[in-house]
Image (cartoon, grey):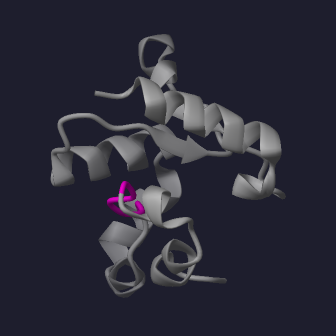
Amino acid sequence: MKGYSWVRKRLPADLRERVIGATWHSRFGHDSMELEWWREASRYRQILRDVQRRAPVHWIALDDDLEGWPETEKARVVPCSPLLGLASLVTQARLAQRLENMP
């Protein structure tokens, strides 16, 4: 599996500058309580926890799992294919539109 740094380096520069992180960190694999929480939490909870830790003023997530996202928060996620991710032109267009509309 490719890591955050590997993926981020391959993004276009204007997008790379806006990426603040990923929800998984390799150190989680060394903490059994953290790993257990991670396995049980929905993607929304994982993302929300990361947002609370980083405290960005504005944010959106790119994810292939919309289960557990409250209706009130779905505007914050750009859905993508688990197989294509950002390789999908539709996902690229959706992400570009969301980024244009962000303050």
Image point 46% across, 35% down: which residue? 99
Report the front residue among 6 and 66.
6
Where 21 falls versus 40 (above or below)?
below
Q: Count how many numbered circles sit on residues in the image.
A: 0
Question: Which one is in front, 44 or 10?
Answer: 10
Q: What is the chief secondary structure element of the magenta stretch?
A: loop
Return the x and y of residue 48 as percentages of the image width and height: 33, 41
Q: Is residue 24 visible?
A: yes
Task: Provide residue 82's location: percent of width, then percent of height.
Answer: 77, 53
Q: Residue at x 81, y 56 (%)?
A: 84
* Above or below, 62 relative to 28: above
Look at the image and give the residue range highlighted in magenta. 18-23
Q: Is residue 40 left or right of residue 78?
A: left
Please determine whether, in this image, residue 88 is positioned above or below residue 29: above
Magenta span includes 22: yes
Which residue is drawn at the image coordinates 81% and 49% (left, top)? 88
Q: Position of residue 86 (x, y in %)?
A: 70, 55
Q: Quadrant of the N terminus?
A: bottom right
Could you say where residue 47 lies in the image, as x and y percent from the top left?
40, 46
- Outermost top residue: 72
Q: Quadrant of the C terminus?
A: top left
